[in-house]
Image: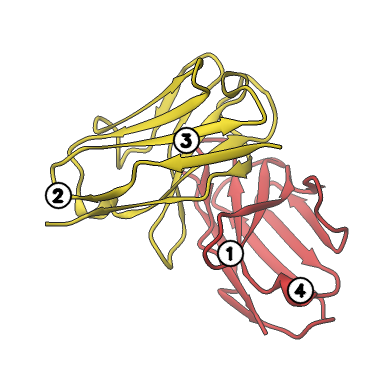
Amino acid sequence: EVQLLQSGGGLVQPGGSLRLSCVASGFTLRTYAMYWVRQIPGKGLQYVSGMSISGNSYYADAVKGRFTISRDNLMNTLYLHMNNLRAEDTALYYCAKRRDASSNLWGHFDYWGQGILVTVSS
Amino acid sequence: EIVLTQSPATLSLSPGERATLSCWASQSVSSYLAWYQQKTGQPPRLLIYDASNRATGIPDRFSGSGSGTDFTLTISSLEPEDFAVYYCQQRIDSPTFGQGTKLEI
Protein backbone atom coordinates (compact mmCIF):
# COMPACT_ATOMS: atom_id res chain seq x y z
CA GLU A 1 0.00 0.00 0.00
CA VAL A 2 1.37 3.39 -1.02
CA GLN A 3 1.72 5.85 1.87
CA LEU A 4 3.36 9.24 2.26
CA LEU A 5 4.06 10.28 5.85
CA GLN A 6 5.00 13.88 6.43
CA SER A 7 6.80 15.60 9.29
CA GLY A 8 8.74 18.75 10.08
CA GLY A 9 6.19 21.55 10.11
CA GLY A 10 5.66 24.10 12.85
CA LEU A 11 5.92 27.73 13.83
CA VAL A 12 8.90 29.74 12.59
CA GLN A 13 9.76 33.42 12.62
CA PRO A 14 10.01 35.44 9.41
CA GLY A 15 13.44 34.89 7.89
CA GLY A 16 13.76 31.51 9.53
CA SER A 17 14.23 28.06 8.07
CA LEU A 18 12.42 24.74 8.20
CA ARG A 19 12.81 21.32 6.61
CA LEU A 20 9.82 19.20 5.65
CA SER A 21 10.14 15.44 5.23
CA CYS A 22 7.96 12.98 3.35
CA VAL A 23 8.70 9.29 3.92
CA ALA A 24 7.38 7.06 1.16
CA SER A 25 6.34 3.44 1.58
CA GLY A 26 4.84 0.93 -0.82
CA PHE A 27 6.87 2.18 -3.79
CA THR A 28 10.40 3.29 -4.68
CA LEU A 29 10.56 7.08 -4.47
CA ARG A 30 13.27 7.54 -7.13
CA THR A 31 11.13 5.84 -9.81
CA TYR A 32 8.42 8.52 -9.74
CA ALA A 33 8.41 12.28 -10.02
CA MET A 34 7.49 13.82 -6.67
CA TYR A 35 6.07 17.18 -5.71
CA TRP A 36 5.27 19.66 -2.97
CA VAL A 37 1.92 21.45 -3.11
CA ARG A 38 0.65 23.94 -0.54
CA GLN A 39 -2.75 25.18 0.54
CA ILE A 40 -3.59 28.20 2.62
CA PRO A 41 -6.30 26.92 5.00
CA GLY A 42 -9.69 27.49 3.42
CA LYS A 43 -8.15 28.43 0.09
CA GLY A 44 -6.98 26.73 -3.10
CA LEU A 45 -3.96 24.63 -4.06
CA GLN A 46 -0.60 25.95 -5.24
CA TYR A 47 2.21 23.93 -6.81
CA VAL A 48 5.48 24.69 -4.99
CA SER A 49 8.19 22.38 -6.30
CA GLY A 50 8.80 19.15 -8.17
CA MET A 51 11.60 16.66 -8.81
CA SER A 52 11.78 14.38 -11.81
CA ILE A 53 13.02 10.79 -11.88
CA SER A 54 16.39 12.01 -13.16
CA GLY A 55 16.66 14.50 -10.31
CA ASN A 56 15.80 17.68 -12.18
CA SER A 57 13.97 20.15 -9.97
CA TYR A 58 11.47 22.93 -10.57
CA TYR A 59 10.20 25.73 -8.38
CA ALA A 60 7.30 28.13 -8.49
CA ASP A 61 8.41 31.75 -8.85
CA ALA A 62 7.13 32.55 -5.35
CA VAL A 63 9.69 30.22 -3.74
CA LYS A 64 12.55 30.19 -6.25
CA GLY A 65 15.90 30.86 -4.58
CA ARG A 66 14.49 30.19 -1.10
CA PHE A 67 13.21 26.59 -1.24
CA THR A 68 15.14 23.46 -2.28
CA ILE A 69 13.66 20.06 -3.04
CA SER A 70 15.78 16.96 -2.52
CA ARG A 71 15.42 13.24 -1.98
CA ASP A 72 17.30 10.50 -0.15
CA ASN A 73 16.99 7.32 -2.19
CA LEU A 74 18.26 5.09 0.62
CA MET A 75 15.72 6.48 3.08
CA ASN A 76 12.99 6.68 0.41
CA THR A 77 12.35 10.22 1.62
CA LEU A 78 11.54 13.51 -0.09
CA TYR A 79 12.51 16.82 1.50
CA LEU A 80 11.66 20.47 1.15
CA HIS A 81 14.24 22.81 2.61
CA MET A 82 12.69 26.23 3.20
CA ASN A 83 14.85 29.28 3.90
CA ASN A 84 14.11 32.97 4.39
CA LEU A 85 10.50 32.17 5.18
CA ARG A 86 7.85 34.84 4.79
CA ALA A 87 4.39 35.29 6.27
CA GLU A 88 2.90 34.46 2.86
CA ASP A 89 4.51 30.99 3.04
CA THR A 90 2.11 30.09 5.85
CA ALA A 91 0.13 27.12 4.55
CA LEU A 92 -0.55 23.43 4.78
CA TYR A 93 2.14 21.66 2.77
CA TYR A 94 1.49 18.36 0.99
CA CYS A 95 3.92 16.00 -0.69
CA ALA A 96 2.43 14.18 -3.67
CA LYS A 97 3.40 11.38 -6.04
CA ARG A 98 3.07 11.46 -9.81
CA ARG A 99 0.46 9.01 -11.06
CA ASP A 100 2.64 7.34 -13.69
CA ALA A 101 6.36 6.58 -13.93
CA SER A 102 7.15 9.00 -16.74
CA SER A 103 10.41 10.88 -17.18
CA ASN A 104 8.42 14.06 -17.77
CA LEU A 105 8.23 16.31 -14.71
CA TRP A 106 4.68 17.49 -15.20
CA GLY A 107 2.06 15.05 -14.00
CA HIS A 108 -1.12 14.41 -12.10
CA PHE A 109 -0.92 13.40 -8.43
CA ASP A 110 -2.38 10.09 -7.29
CA TYR A 111 -1.14 9.86 -3.71
CA TRP A 112 -0.81 12.67 -1.19
CA GLY A 113 0.67 12.98 2.25
CA GLN A 114 -1.50 13.94 5.17
CA GLY A 115 -0.33 17.55 5.03
CA ILE A 116 1.81 19.47 7.48
CA LEU A 117 1.18 23.01 8.69
CA VAL A 118 3.87 25.66 8.39
CA THR A 119 3.18 28.94 10.19
CA VAL A 120 5.48 31.91 9.66
CA SER A 121 4.88 34.53 12.31
CA SER A 122 6.73 36.61 14.88
CA GLU B 1 1.25 30.54 -16.31
CA ILE B 2 -1.87 28.73 -17.44
CA VAL B 3 -4.90 29.95 -15.50
CA LEU B 4 -7.73 27.54 -14.81
CA THR B 5 -11.16 29.01 -14.05
CA GLN B 6 -13.82 26.84 -12.47
CA SER B 7 -17.56 27.42 -12.56
CA PRO B 8 -19.69 27.71 -10.58
CA ALA B 9 -17.94 28.66 -7.34
CA THR B 10 -20.69 26.94 -5.38
CA LEU B 11 -23.21 24.37 -6.59
CA SER B 12 -26.18 23.49 -4.42
CA LEU B 13 -27.83 20.16 -5.24
CA SER B 14 -29.50 17.22 -3.53
CA PRO B 15 -28.55 13.54 -3.35
CA GLY B 16 -29.65 11.72 -6.48
CA GLU B 17 -29.29 14.78 -8.70
CA ARG B 18 -26.77 15.21 -11.52
CA ALA B 19 -23.83 17.58 -11.01
CA THR B 20 -21.98 19.32 -13.81
CA LEU B 21 -18.79 21.21 -12.97
CA SER B 22 -16.77 23.22 -15.49
CA CYS B 23 -13.12 24.16 -15.86
CA TRP B 24 -11.76 26.55 -18.49
CA ALA B 25 -8.07 26.95 -19.33
CA SER B 26 -6.52 30.25 -20.47
CA GLN B 27 -4.77 28.33 -23.26
CA SER B 28 -4.97 24.81 -24.60
CA VAL B 29 -3.90 22.05 -22.24
CA SER B 30 -4.75 19.32 -24.77
CA SER B 31 -6.23 16.49 -22.66
CA TYR B 32 -3.80 16.98 -19.77
CA LEU B 33 -6.38 17.88 -17.17
CA ALA B 34 -7.26 16.17 -13.89
CA TRP B 35 -10.06 16.51 -11.35
CA TYR B 36 -9.64 16.14 -7.59
CA GLN B 37 -12.09 15.91 -4.71
CA GLN B 38 -11.18 17.38 -1.34
CA LYS B 39 -13.09 16.97 1.89
CA THR B 40 -12.46 19.05 4.99
CA GLY B 41 -9.30 18.00 6.81
CA GLN B 42 -8.20 15.62 4.05
CA PRO B 43 -5.74 15.85 1.17
CA PRO B 44 -7.10 15.99 -2.37
CA ARG B 45 -8.14 12.70 -3.99
CA LEU B 46 -7.51 12.08 -7.68
CA LEU B 47 -10.79 11.34 -9.49
CA ILE B 48 -10.08 11.81 -13.20
CA TYR B 49 -6.77 12.11 -15.07
CA ASP B 50 -6.02 13.17 -18.62
CA ALA B 51 -9.52 14.59 -18.99
CA SER B 52 -11.57 11.39 -19.08
CA ASN B 53 -9.81 8.51 -17.30
CA ARG B 54 -11.10 7.46 -13.91
CA ALA B 55 -8.41 6.90 -11.30
CA THR B 56 -8.15 3.60 -9.47
CA GLY B 57 -11.14 2.89 -7.25
CA ILE B 58 -13.25 5.83 -8.42
CA PRO B 59 -16.95 4.96 -8.92
CA ASP B 60 -18.33 5.13 -12.44
CA ARG B 61 -20.81 7.86 -11.49
CA PHE B 62 -17.83 10.21 -11.94
CA SER B 63 -16.94 11.05 -15.53
CA GLY B 64 -14.80 13.65 -17.23
CA SER B 65 -14.87 15.12 -20.71
CA GLY B 66 -13.34 17.87 -22.80
CA SER B 67 -10.12 18.86 -24.49
CA GLY B 68 -8.23 22.01 -25.35
CA THR B 69 -9.63 24.71 -23.07
CA ASP B 70 -13.07 23.46 -21.98
CA PHE B 71 -13.56 20.59 -19.54
CA THR B 72 -16.44 19.09 -17.57
CA LEU B 73 -16.71 16.83 -14.54
CA THR B 74 -20.07 15.08 -14.28
CA ILE B 75 -21.40 13.19 -11.29
CA SER B 76 -24.37 11.26 -12.62
CA SER B 77 -26.28 10.73 -9.36
CA LEU B 78 -24.99 12.40 -6.23
CA GLU B 79 -24.30 10.35 -3.15
CA PRO B 80 -24.09 11.99 0.31
CA GLU B 81 -20.30 11.46 0.36
CA ASP B 82 -19.84 13.45 -2.87
CA PHE B 83 -20.46 16.82 -1.23
CA ALA B 84 -17.00 18.35 -1.13
CA VAL B 85 -14.74 20.81 -2.98
CA TYR B 86 -13.57 19.89 -6.48
CA TYR B 87 -10.44 21.18 -8.19
CA CYS B 88 -9.14 20.87 -11.73
CA GLN B 89 -5.39 20.76 -12.50
CA GLN B 90 -3.40 20.91 -15.72
CA ARG B 91 -0.06 19.26 -16.45
CA ILE B 92 0.87 20.46 -19.93
CA ASP B 93 3.08 23.08 -18.25
CA SER B 94 4.08 23.86 -14.68
CA PRO B 95 1.01 22.52 -12.86
CA THR B 96 -1.72 24.94 -11.89
CA PHE B 97 -5.05 24.37 -10.16
CA GLY B 98 -8.44 25.97 -10.52
CA GLN B 99 -9.85 27.88 -7.57
CA GLY B 100 -12.34 25.12 -6.76
CA THR B 101 -16.07 24.43 -6.88
CA LYS B 102 -17.84 23.74 -3.62
CA LEU B 103 -20.58 21.16 -4.05
CA GLU B 104 -23.04 21.55 -1.21
CA ILE B 105 -26.39 20.14 -0.23
Secondary structure at badge 2 equals: loop
Say which residue appears at 67% left-offset and 54% top-offset: B35
Q: Are marks 2 and 1 in contact (CB under 8 Å)?
A: no
Q: Are marks 2 and 4 in contact (CB under 8 Å)?
A: no
Indicate which label's residue lies in the foreground, 1 or 3: 3
The label shown at residue B6 is: 1
Q: Nearer the viewer, residue B24 or A70?
A: A70
Q: Position of residue B65 (x, y in %)?
A: 79, 54
Chain under numbered label 3: A
**Which image quarter: residue B86?**
bottom right
Q: Are marks 2 and 3 on the same chain?
A: yes
Q: Hey, what amino acid is under mark 4?
A: Ala
State the residue position of label 3. A22
Q: Nearer the viewer, residue A47 or A27?
A: A27
The label shown at residue A13 is: 2
Q: Hey, what amino acid is under mark 3?
A: Cys
State the residue position of label 4. B19
Structural crowding at the residue carrying mark 2, measured as other residues with C-alpha within 10 Å and reported as few (<14), some (14–19) or many (≥20): some
Secondary structure at badge 3 equals: strand
Indicate which label's residue lies in the foreground, 4 or 3: 3
Which quadrant holds the C terminus of chain A?
bottom left
